[in-house]
Amino acid sequence: MRLLNRQLNGLAGRVSRHRRRPLAGLLVLLLGLLLTGTVYAAFSPSSATAGAAESDTEQIAKGRQLFLVGCAFCHGQNGEGVRAQRDGNIIGPPLVGVGAAAVDFQVGTGRMPMAQPGAQVKAKAPVYNADEIAALAAYVASLGPGPAIPDAGDYSLEGLSDQEREEAIVRGGQIFLTNCTACHNFEGSGGAMPRGGYAPKIRGVEPRYIYEAMLTGPQSMDVFSNGNLSPDEKRDVIAYLQSLENQPNYGGFGLGGLGPVSEGLAAWLLGIGACVGFAVWIAAHTTRTSKGNVSA
């Protein structure tokens, strides 16, 4: 027993001596740093997330600067909207809660900034580039929750089989003919609306903008939120419109695809007009012949 105690005491003494050596101190320091780094990595946000947050902040700040220069005159410095002082009419509607999708549609299609006031804002070449549009959308989205810019997977048929694609086109056609033809025509060629407005042509339009238009309801268009039309149903409508691009016109001249309006006009001018003109010619010729016979 005494011998065991002596051995333990000797071992403890050797350990104590090693602890006092510089190498032992360095080893303890390295172990401490390793433990601290492990704990920090486990509980702190990743550098990628922090970098993304910083990038979002910078993008919003850039968007605000662009907004103050090009949009605040009509929509207010904080997107609260502006009314005329005399008649109280809205110069620019409030943008709080419209979301990034509305900005991407309006600015991406060149409708905003508005060239001149009117019943209908026409599409034109965009004033801002893609990065500036993204910054403006990020700033407006920061004002209040709203629809986000859709991803390509939201309106693309990638990954579907041929049969599934055909089924999506059929479903989209049924939805479009039920909800959209009253304004946009059965071919998506657009049409006139009351009070100086019109439904624009939506054939050949980029699918993202069609999706955003359904999602946000710009100008006179109704809002088809995801509660009204699911994302898959919106995708199906876009698939139907894209299928019209390659569909042959079996009726001969398309006449702009405007349906009964242009067809009726062509019938009156060409068909009935020709008949009326021929009838007038016959009547005039018969009258001259009768007069000649009487004088003889």
Image (spheres, rainbow, N blue to C red):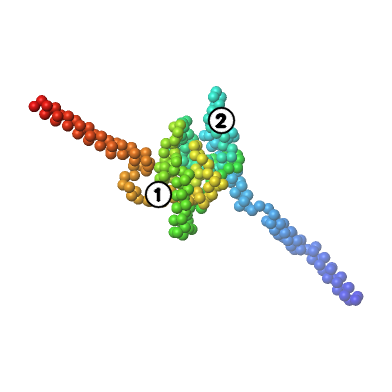
> SS class of the residue under badge 2?
strand
Question: Residue 64 location, x and y as percent?
Answer: 57, 38
Residue at 40 percent of width and 49 percent of height:
244
Query: Is 38 on the left or on the right of 150, as rendered?
Result: right
Residue at 17 percent of width and 29 percent of height:
287
Question: Three-letter amino acid code at disc 1?
Answer: Leu
Residue lying at the far right in this picture: please name it: 2
Question: Residue 147 location, x and y as percent?
Answer: 56, 44
Circle 1 packing at 10 Å, graded few (<14), some (14-19), many (20+), is some
Residue at the disc numbered 2: 82
Q: In the depicted view, which residue is nearer to us: 162 or 250?
A: 250
Query: Is 39 on the left or on the right of 240, as rendered?
Result: right
Alpha carbon of mark 2 to alpha carbon of mark 1: how far? Answer: 41 Å
Residue at 55 percent of width and 33 percent of height:
93
The quadrant of the rendering that contains the N terminus is bottom right
Q: Exactly how many numbered labels are in the figure?
A: 2
**Label at residue 94:** none
Question: Three-letter amino acid code at disc 2?
Answer: Val
Image marks 2 and 1: residues in contact by CB distance under 8 Å? no
> SS class of the residue under badge 1?
helix
Residue at 44 percent of width and 56 percent of height:
166
- The answer to whether residue 230 is seen in the rendering is yes
Query: Is 178 on the left or on the right of 38, as rendered?
Result: left
Q: In the depicted view, which residue is nearer to us: 103 or 134?
A: 103
Q: Is residue 151 above or below residue 76?
A: below
Considering only order in the chain, which callout, 1 or 2, is on the residue closer to the N terminus? 2
The quadrant of the rendering that contains the C terminus is top left
Question: Residue 184 location, x and y as percent?
Answer: 43, 41
Q: Quadrant of residue 61?
A: top right
**Label at residue 244:** 1
Question: Residue 34 location, x and y as percent?
Answer: 71, 59
